[in-house]
Image (cartoon, coloured by chain):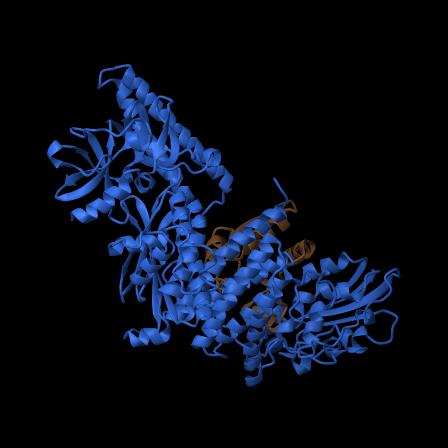
Chain colours: A brown, B blue
């Protein structure tokens, strides 16, 4: 079964890395470049899981997650946060905003895939 | 295609350049006092993204430095430190170091530790100050490590338990049971309400557990005590799972990683007396969420084995307001248009092909012309459209290669910072027209000459602080770097508000070096031109900055090689201005096709001011080989192109001859006598440098419509090397 993923990161390198990691692994990938763009893209799709960066222009990751959780579309979708540090503080903030889990950058491919499969069932 | 990781790596470095550009823009805005709340975020994100990408490629030096930088910037962002001049200065230098590290990583050369350590140390001091002053348990910067290692196991739990005790070694063996043995694990899992709203799904967790080995799952349901109780939002489901597996407890922890704090979890090995979570500290797997545990409903599963409940989030914590959501509207949209990345090689191929197309088109035009078709024939009209299309295609293709000069200017701001601090001057660089576009190759090849000129301006152009004050100027010197489009060319100007050129000293030096005769009387403009002579250096003592054995003559030839011109104007006590004029593209030029002694030549149209038909009354003979022509009351030296190129002896009579009036960048003029003007058209430049080196007076060659090869002349060079010119010029001076 193909898992549909929306990945949001303002860094092209990160988007490329995610694309490469998920290529040929049974994922359908949608990309967005910041939180606002992510909301725009999300309006047209219903992904099984969302990955989002935190530090982004226009609308950051926390803002994006809050907007999804407070919105009507994909309100309960699992959202994984991409963080650089695995600092407890950041995780707590992400969770407060409504994140499902987190991926620590740089991520190992298998770890990313495992996490995506896990939260999307 | 090559290794995809290599491609991403290459694109990462391109992205780094863009991020660095954004970083320096933001820093500049902070320095200028034009920063708003978003500016620091932009700067922070730039460094953060560089760090993130660098981590993926295990560029440890880059990651470590970016982390320090980012931490300091975060301190500024959260107002733990103040944005004073010293800090902004430090950030600028950090940006420079970061650029160095990015380039070192890109070129796979080891970075120079001597350059990085001091500045990293300065950053550390800044960060340490805030840590000392604030009582916050900030994560020590040194604790960051790239997490490319496998994150399985208790890594994150360790984080939770070791806050503030980062140095404590973690003995993983303490929790690892022998792997080769199957054992039965009992997992008690009771989700809190928050688990459901976080997007986690108990079913998926149970499925993941089932992947570890055969499972026996029992669901427990807390029946509500009464109707009121049933109405209360409370998670009433819990599970006890017995899984037979040979994996260790870490694998189980990993499955429940995302729900730590959102559930009561207890893992134990069946057959051992106590749950694993009660033995040493690192083995604690059960995390209790202390929120909303209703005493009346507290079940045994809830608290067993919790040694130190760590609330992940205080119950009162509200979701943080999206800190940039509000500013999104206020900020002007800076969204860039979508882009496609194409290798330069492909573009160059396209440029070449378009060049061939232009040649082909002109050959076709010529054939049609020779066929002597009626002027309103269909072929003629079609050809006209073809011509227009070719020109449009050509322009579009040239636009692909064009890039804003911004990156170049930003490099210069670094040169100003470094040079000014080295010579102890206070200098401000003002840039204008950063979005002016010019051919990419030109941008690359301008870096060295501009660097040299900027160094010169800081080192020699501007006075010392004391000197400025004595002259009644502000202590801070100003260097202005601007780019603009002017009549089909790009003009780059570098001006300073320094003392201007000391012409006496320049002349004295030139005389001493034998570059001009000792009794020569030269106009101010001519003296300024001496700076461009090979082997000229005015610096009283060669400083280690600008005097690196590279003179302005090298600058000039670099500019000339790009089809550009450089001129200088200076006013004593007010400042000096260098103006560089460059063609928009390096591949095609508008040329005038001329004939001399049955040879066909091309003169760049930009060099030609006007064309003249010489009248006998306007011509004055100044010597055997020298004539001048009077153009609107000003005498201009006449140069016979046939003679200058060695096609024929100097001509005796210039009456009714056709001349091209060439105006040089410095305003000096000369009239080039030609036999005929054939055409005016675009020609594709084919370099001669690779095959013939520099040929005096010749810039390049081209292929004309009839397949004939024609030389493209370099009028400035031609005039400078003219056989009769120096005498002519000197005599003109005398004449008036």
Kindly identify the residue that appears in the image at 37 percent across and 62 percent down.
B457
Which quarter of the image is occupied by the N terminus of chain B? top right
Kindly identify the residue that appears in the image at 48 percent across and 53 percent down.
A41
Provide residue B291's location: percent of width, then percent of height: 62, 78
A100 relative to B22 in the view: left or right: right
Residue B184 falls in which quadrant of the image? bottom right
Residue B367 falls in which quadrant of the image? top left
Residue in front for this viewpoint, B349 or B566: B566
Q: Is residue A93 visible?
A: no
Kindly identify the residue that appears in the image at 61 percent across and 73 percent down.
B141
B363 relative to B311 in the view: left or right: left
Residue in front for this viewpoint, B561 or B605: B561
Q: Is residue B460 visible?
A: yes
Provide residue B93's location: percent of width, then percent of height: 50, 68
Q: Residue furthest left?
A: B617
- Total marks in image: 0
Provide residue B516's location: percent of width, then percent of height: 32, 52
Residue in front for this viewpoint, B687 or A92: B687
Q: Residue furthest front?
A: B519
Depicted B433 relative to depicted B707: above or below: below
Depicted B447 relative to depicted B331: above or below: above
Provide residue A48's location: percent of width, then percent of height: 59, 54
Residue in front for this viewpoint, A18 or B622: B622
Depicted B342 relative to depicted B230: above or below: above
């Amino acid at each position: 079964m193909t898992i549909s993923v929306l990945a949001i990161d303002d860094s092209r390198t990160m988007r490329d890395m995610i694309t490469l990691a998920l290529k040929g692994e049974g994922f359908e990938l949608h990309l967005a470049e910041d939180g606002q763009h992510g909301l725009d893209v999300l309006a047209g799709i219903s992904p099984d899981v969302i990955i989002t960066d935190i530090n982004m222009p226009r609308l950051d990751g926390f803002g994006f997650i809050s907007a999804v959780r407070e919105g009507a579309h994909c309100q309960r979708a699992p959202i994984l946060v991409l963080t650089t540090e695995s600092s407890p503080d950041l995780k707590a903030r992400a969770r407060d905003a409504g994140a499902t889990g987190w991926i620590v950058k740089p991520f190992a491919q298998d770890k990313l895939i495992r996490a995506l499969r896990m939260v999307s069932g | 295609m090559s290794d995809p990781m290599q491609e991403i790596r290459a694109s990462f470095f391109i992205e780094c350049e863009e991020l660095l550009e954004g970083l320096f823009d933001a820093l500049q805005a902070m320095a200028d006092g034009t920063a708003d709340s978003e500016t620091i975020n932009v700067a922070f994100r730039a460094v953060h993204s560089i760090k993130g990408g660098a981590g993926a490629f295990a560029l440890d030096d880059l990651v470590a430095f970016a982390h320090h930088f980012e931490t300091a910037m975060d301190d500024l962002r959260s107002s733990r430190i103040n944005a004073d001049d010293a800090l902004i200065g430090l950030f600028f230098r950090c940006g420079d170091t970061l650029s160095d590290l990015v380039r070192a990583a890109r070129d796979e050369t080891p970075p120079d530790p001597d350059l990085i350590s001091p500045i990293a140390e300065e950053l550390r001091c800044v960060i340490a100050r805030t840590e000392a002053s604030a009582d916050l348990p900030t994560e020590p910067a040194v604790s960051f490590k790239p997490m490319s290692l496998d994150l399985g196991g208790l890594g994150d739990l360790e984080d939770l338990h070791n806050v503030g005790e980062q140095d404590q070694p973690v003995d993983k063996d303490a929790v690892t049971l022998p792997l080769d043995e199957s054992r039965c694990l009992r997992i008690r899992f009771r989700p809190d309400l928050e688990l459901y709203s976080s997007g986690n799904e108990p079913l998926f967790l149970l499925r993941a557990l089932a992947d570890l080995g055969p499972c026996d799952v029992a669901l427990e349901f807390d029946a509500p005590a009464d109707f009121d109780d049933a109405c209360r939002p409370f998670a009433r489901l819990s599970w006890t799972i017995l899984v037979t597996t040979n994996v260790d407890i870490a694998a189980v922890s990993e499955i429940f990683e995302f729900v730590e704090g959102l559930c009561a979890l207890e893992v134990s090995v069946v057959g051992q007396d106590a749950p694993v979570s009660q033995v040493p500290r690192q083995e604690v797997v059960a995390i209790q969420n202390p929120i909303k545990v209703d005493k009346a409903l507290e079940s045994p599963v809830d608290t067993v084995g919790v040694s130190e409940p760590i609330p992940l989030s205080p119950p009162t914590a509200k979701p943080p307001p999206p800190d940039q959501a509000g500013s999104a509207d206020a900020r002007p949209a800076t969204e860039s248009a979508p882009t496609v990345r194409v290798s330069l090689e492909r573009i160059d191929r396209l440029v070449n092909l378009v060049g061939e197309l232009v040649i082909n088109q002109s050959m076709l035009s010529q054939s049609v012309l020779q066929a002597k078709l009626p002027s309103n024939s269909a072929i003629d009209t079609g050809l006209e459209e073809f011509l227009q299309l070719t020109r449009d295609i050509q322009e579009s293709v040239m636009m692909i290669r064009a890039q804003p000069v911004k990156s170049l200017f930003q490099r210069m701001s670094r040169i100003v910072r470094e040079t000014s601090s080295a010579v102890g001057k206070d200098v401000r660089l003002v840039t204008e027209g950063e979005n002016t576009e010019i051919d990419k190759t030109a941008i690359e090849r301008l870096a060295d000459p501009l660097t040299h000129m900027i160094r010169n301006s800081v080192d020699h152009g501007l006075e010392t602080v004391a000197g400025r004050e004595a002259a009644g100027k502000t202590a801070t010197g100003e260097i202005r770097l601007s780019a603009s489009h002017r009549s089909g060319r790009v003009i780059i100007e570098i001006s300073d508000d320094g003392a201007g050129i000391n012409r006496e000293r320049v002349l004295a030096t030139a005389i001493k070096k034998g570059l001009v005769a000792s009794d020569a009387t030269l106009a101010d403009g001519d003296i300024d031109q001496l700076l461009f002579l090979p082997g000229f250096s005015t610096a009283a003592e060669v400083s280690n900055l600008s005097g690196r054995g590279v003179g302005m003559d090298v600058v000039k030839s670099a500019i000339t090689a790009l089809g550009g011109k450089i001129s200088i104007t200076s006013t004593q006590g007010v400042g000096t201005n260098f103006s560089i004029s460059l063609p928009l593209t390096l591949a095609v030029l508008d040329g005038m096709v001329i004939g001399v002694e049955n040879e066909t030549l091309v003169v760049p149209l930009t060099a030609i001011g006007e064309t003249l038909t010489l009248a006998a009354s306007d011509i004055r003979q100044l010597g055997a080989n020298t004539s001048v022509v009077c153009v609107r009351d000003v005498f201009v030296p006449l140069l016979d192109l046939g003679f200058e190129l060695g096609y024929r002896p100097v001509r005796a009579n210039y009456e009714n001859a056709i001349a091209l009036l060439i105006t040089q960048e410095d305003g000096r003029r000369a009239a080039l006598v030609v036999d005929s003007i054939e055409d005016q058209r675009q020609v594709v430049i084919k370099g001669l440098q690779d095959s013939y080196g520099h040929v005096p007076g010749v810039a390049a060659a081209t292929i004309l419509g009839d397949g004939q090869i024609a030389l493209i002349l370099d009028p400035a060079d031609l005039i400078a090397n003219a056989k009769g010119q120096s005498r002519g010029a000197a005599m003109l001076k005398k004449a008036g």
